[in-house]
Amino acid sequence: MKGGFTRKYLASGGKDGEHCHSRKRKGEAAVWQRRFWEHYIRDAEDFQKHVDYIHFNPVKHGLVERPADWQWSSFHRHLRAGWYDPDWGAQEPLSIAGLTPRE
């Protein structure tokens, strides 16, 4: 996904970022952040696991104490729809325990 987008973006006149030594050596474009990762969602369970990961991320990084405290989150919409309990995310959900950008 990233490769196809990058090729089309650069071919249409998109700007490449600054290349560090490592990117030059590997022949990588500098369009994406180094730690950006892609993942194809496999099924409904995988989708929910990644939505949980996104909603818990501000807590994980110490920005808020619970997902409901992050004002820019889609968590609020999902809470109104009844998909989450108001206290969800007070602790790291088991669904995302150990989830890394490689999964």
Image: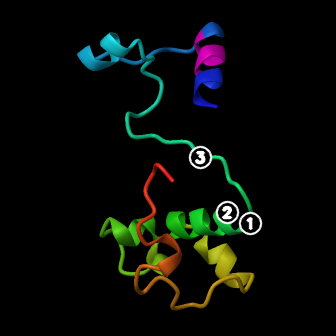
Q: Which residue corresponds to mark 2? A: 47
- Residue 39's tag is 3
In the rendered view, does 1 fall on the left or right side of 92? right
Asked if the residue under mark 3 is in contact with the one under mark 2, i.e. CB atoms within 8 Å, the reply is: no
Q: Main secondary structure of the magenta part?
A: helix
The magenta segment: 6-10
Q: CA distance from mark 2 to mark 3?
A: 10 Å
Give the quarter of the image for residue 97.
bottom left
Q: CA distance from mark 1 to mark 2?
A: 5 Å
Q: Amino acid at mark 2?
A: Phe
Where disc 1 sits, the SS reads helix
Give the quarter of the image for residue 82.
bottom right
x, y percent for residue 30: 42, 21
Residue 15 makes an appearance in the image: yes
Where disc 3 sits, the SS reads loop
Asked if the residue under mark 2 is in contact with the one under mark 1, i.e. CB atoms within 8 Å, the reply is: yes
The answer to whether 48 is drawn above or below residue 83 in the figure is above
* Disc on the earlier residue, 2 or 3: 3
- Residue 44's tag is 1
